[in-house]
Image (tube, coloured by chain):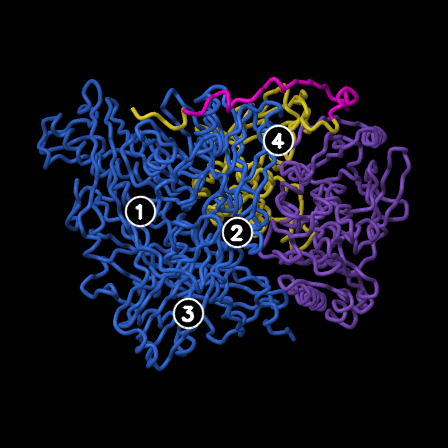
Chain colours: A purple, B blue, C yellow
Amino acid sequence: MKAFTYERVRTVAEAAAARARTPGAKFIAGGTNLLDLMKLQIETPEHLIDVGKLPLNTIEPAPDGGLRIGALVSNTKLAADIRVRRDYGVLSRAILAGASGQLRNKATTAGNLLQRTRCPYFYDTNQACNKRKPGSGCAAIEGSSRSLAVIGGSSSCIATYPGDMAVAMMALDAVIETVDARGATRSIPIAEFYRLPGETPHIDNVLTESELITSVVLPPPVGGKHTYYKVRDRASYAFALVSVAVILQENGTGRVAVGGVAPRPWRSREAEVLLPSGAQAVTDKLFAGANPTEENKYKLTLVARTLAGVLNEAKR
Amino acid sequence: MKFTTPAGPNPTDQQRVIGKPTSRIEGPLKTTGQAKYAYEYNEEVSNPAYGYVVGAGIARGRIEAIHQTRAKLSPGVLAIVTAANIGPLRTGLFYTDRLLAGPTIDHYHQAVAIVVAETFEQARAAAALLRIDYVREEGAFDLAAGKDSAQAPPAGPFSPPAETSVGDFATAFASAPVTLDETYTTPDQSHAMMEPHATMASWDGDRLTCWCTIQQLSWGVRDLAHILDVPAANIRLISSYIGGGFGGKGTVLSDLVAAALAARATGRPVKVTLQRPLIFNNTIHRPATIQRIRLGATPDGKLTAIGHESWSGNLRGGRTETTIASTRLMYAGANRMTKLRLAILDLAEGSAMRAPGEASGMMALEIAMDEMAEKLAMDPVEFRIINDTQVDPENSARPFSTRLLVECLKTGAERFGWSQHNATPAAVREGQWLVGMGVASAIRGAPVMPCAARVRLDRNGIVTVETDMTDIGTGSYTIIAQTAAEMMGIGLDQVVVKLGDSIFPVSPGSAGQWGAASATSGVYAACVKLREAVATALELPVDEARFEDGRVIAGDRSFPLADAAGAEELVAEDEMTYGDLGRQYARDTFGAHFVEVGVHQYTGEIRVRRMLAVAHAGRILNPTAARSQMIGAMTMGVGAALMEKMEVDTRVGFFVNHDLAGYEVPVHADIPHLDVVLLEDSDPTMSPMKAKGIGELGIVGVAAAIANAVYNATGVRVRDYPVTLDKLIDKLPVPA
Amino acid sequence: MKKSKLSSITRREMLVGTAAAVTVTLTPGTLGKVANLAGNPNPKLVETGVRLTVNGELQELTLDTRTTLLDTLREHLNLTGTKKGCDHGQCGACTVLVNGERINSCLTLALQHEGDEITTIEGLGTPENLHPLQAAFVKHDGYQCGYCTPGQICSAVGTLKEIEAGVPSHVSADLLASPEASNMELRERMSGNICRCGAYSNIAEALEEVAGNS
């Protein structure tokens, strides 16, 4: 871990300003992903701005009937919030399917959105990885790729987005609110938040250098039956091979977002409208243009079958 | 004391303390964080520096240059130790790996430098500033590709003959009415013990003390002396508590060499712990295997031909994985052959991991037995029972000392409700889950090794035991205390056990499932001597003296045991050694595993629902500790069955998933309540303790029982471990 | 006596200058004074003060900014009961309670805990006066090598508290119901604590007993 200077900030404005004036600075809140990567010299900030004590840790009703989740609300607190459990069950379920109790107590809402891939080649600084070191190549595409992306990748990178929470937020059409160093705020629909790798896989999302996530807004509840089904080899404390976030209405329509298959949570309206036709139809549409490797092509079957299981369970 | 004929009655038969389900005597220390592990002896040395091991960034080739300037200028850096400034080091006498490499590199993450600094943070940061220029060379990383050119490994102390043959296998197999010929593969696995390899080394002149985490301290002293070229007498190793080993900490690995060299270089005590992401490629592992099994049987299920061929890989000088060991003893069958072949691979060293050979071999053989039972339309329990043998199948003049495999299978079937087993695959459904049952036999050798111990009786009647035996979680402290308490007629609270220090009398350490039987026998021998000394001191006839309730009694005379200590203390030391009973008798432990799994009919997820093991392992010294050894090994068997695999990148030449997020081992949620039945036994051919080890038996057969249960649940036969959902998903029936 | 090959290495060759180390002590919020660190290939040692309450005792420390809470406990406060198993949040051996909640102490900087109350395994009980969970682990043989044990026990304290507070889990059938300390609930919630010795079956039973289910 490279040496760094450290400061604590008390206001959002201070935080953004600190980031703007300090090259090589990063925000730290929970730190559960950043410190992991810093120990491996994958992240090497010169300066850490501890935003952990900013007043962003409450969940408030939004004026339109939705919920505004402070950026620093812990995963545990968010999953346990009675309004989330009642109206956004898919979000509680997704969070509870991720990581461990200890990590969920520490990890924050914004930090969870920003967690980086778990591609094993990204994690080993001796290996070629365009996401970690632009231009170095991608060792994963022809390497060990069982856990990696089947769609949305490029010839530069097939890393997956590893999280669960964002998959549910994708299904919920969450909006990410930010502020930058000049005090300008913006609202980014989660569907537009993550970037596909293309030729620049080192850039995970659309945030600018000094931009700080302040909250995530959930639109008003949409009702329906909420399911988050996460498939993994061991029963807990593991990243998804695939996961599906499903909100199903009584009339058979609904929403589907898929995790573990792409560089971002994967969702398509064109696929969702096929829900009444069944899981295979949805999956075929969702994965049109998929480019799996020999090692991860099972994910296509797995998504179709997992979704079929969810739909079957919902009917019972 | 030399043990040459089967044991008769002796004080251990009282079973006053031995055989009782005693809580671990070190429990209060472990549960309160007071038990000290290698890296934690902060009070023992002052002003330690911190070493950080740098692993090679390539798999095979050589170092052209190590650019050290930036690292040297980094704050707090005290020294950078490399092969270039240390000079040539030898290897140890058990592991073949070079523990500080350079300029040539033999495998990925082989240690190439140790950066020493004032603090851990400084050492880690400076290590990242080393720039190493490598020249890559072609390497061999793919066992399957190297299979055809693999060679017969040389026989040796831990390597059985490369080929064995009894009867006429080829003819018998060719003429057998029912045959099976299948190939199974097992992957590279990591011990993944919770405590990383760690050492704190401190030199005092030319004498070296290391607080380390080594299962066999006498091997450690021997190997470190050889590697560093210092006299063994100058080395003291201390491993009072070891945070798990499973064979992965047998003797000296890179942390110990790094700490010793760094401490020498800086003139300071140095602490080194291997960072977790380094351990998988830097240290040892259970190597992958390819196994071909051929079975021939009569229509009524009698095996007539058993053939087992096995391929594994290793570094030059490394040993082969002896998968065929259990096949040679498991079932009757007049015509049999085994064959081992070893490919040279430029991956980290393959070596012992819990039940080496047997665990991997039975992963294959016990699926084959399940497949054969199906071909014969026999119940798999019954098929195993009718092929039981009470003599060594390769030598009918050599009986098993005790062998209750049939009772294990029958008891297990009864307790588990095996009669509910539906022989038709994919026939049992509960909601979205397909449910299946599986069974497998277990066998594991029961070696016993010479062991010395010293016992001291003090004026307060406290008996202190000293031996360099280790406790890696097995319960050594407790069963040794039980042995001393039984022998000296005192309570457990009157016994102090001191282990894990190489200045104590030499034990064989914790390995090979020999620890419990060997160490307690050494303590027995020392206690016999102490009893003689006590009787003599109290002027009682040695043969008549009884040791009960803290007193020594003979005829109508009775004295407190403490009286024998006199003004100072009474000390006795002895070593238990052995004759050739091990050649006269086949001595093994046996078991049967029964498993029920659920397989999600949509996703293929596999979850263990119930597990039962029945074990037959000599006299059980402590049922609590023995049961824990069993459930622990069963848990590791679940990992082997369902998730554990180091993925080899055969282009780059390394284990890709080299951390505890990528290399999955079972977590709480994977493991239901585990049932264990320990059959009554006492094996007088072993030692006066009449006990066998049980630490490795529990993993043997588990993975196959699970794979068989998955087959029973789904109708999909997976012969390539681990059994993961991606291997099922295309073959699972599409739910209606 | 045979001379060791090691002694042929000269100390001069091995020892490199420590004079490069320059201490810059910062107080929180004094960012501007050290901005010159940026871009320096050999950054100076950066230390900062922090105050923590550990097991009821106030600790005022000056630490390298990089020091994790785990290494602070083990290397600076000699509280070695908290274990380093992976140092990457992948095993749970380092679990401690911070303001009553369980976290991985390896994935947090000490500096992030200014003013926090930390409870480690040493703060729960002693060999002479075991915490009920410590006693239950001994009784049920909920450990073998002992290395994951402090983390398991701290995590168990947190787990039972979370159940009491109504926090649901992955295996809770009904998100709106109060969770129970069932065997499956306990196992799911404890899954962030790996025990390679495989004492899980016994650990779950130790927790069930303390939770009052058995």
Mark 1 lies on residue? B514
Relative to B343, is B280 on the left or the right? right
**Kind of residue sitting beneath label 4:** Ala
Query: Where does the image place residue C5, in percent across and percent down from the top left?
Result: 38, 28
Q: Residues within 10 Å of mark 1 (few under 14, many from 20)?
A: many
Q: Point out the tag, 4 or 2, that comes first from the N-terminus.
A: 4
Q: Secondary structure at mark 3?
A: helix
Label 2 or label 3, whichever lies nearer to me, is 3
Does residue C31 show up magenta in the picture? yes
Chain letter, disc 1 residue = B
Q: Nearer the viewer, residue B359 or C91?
A: B359
**Kind of residue sitting beneath label 1:** Trp
Same chain under badges 4 and 3? The reply is yes
Mark 3 lies on residue? B368
One can see residue C42 in this view: yes
Query: Where does the image place residue C22, in percent across and percent down from the top left?
Result: 65, 18
Mark 2 lies on residue? B666
Q: Secondary structure at mark 2?
A: loop
One can see residue C183 in this view: no
Magenta stretch, residue numbers: C8-37
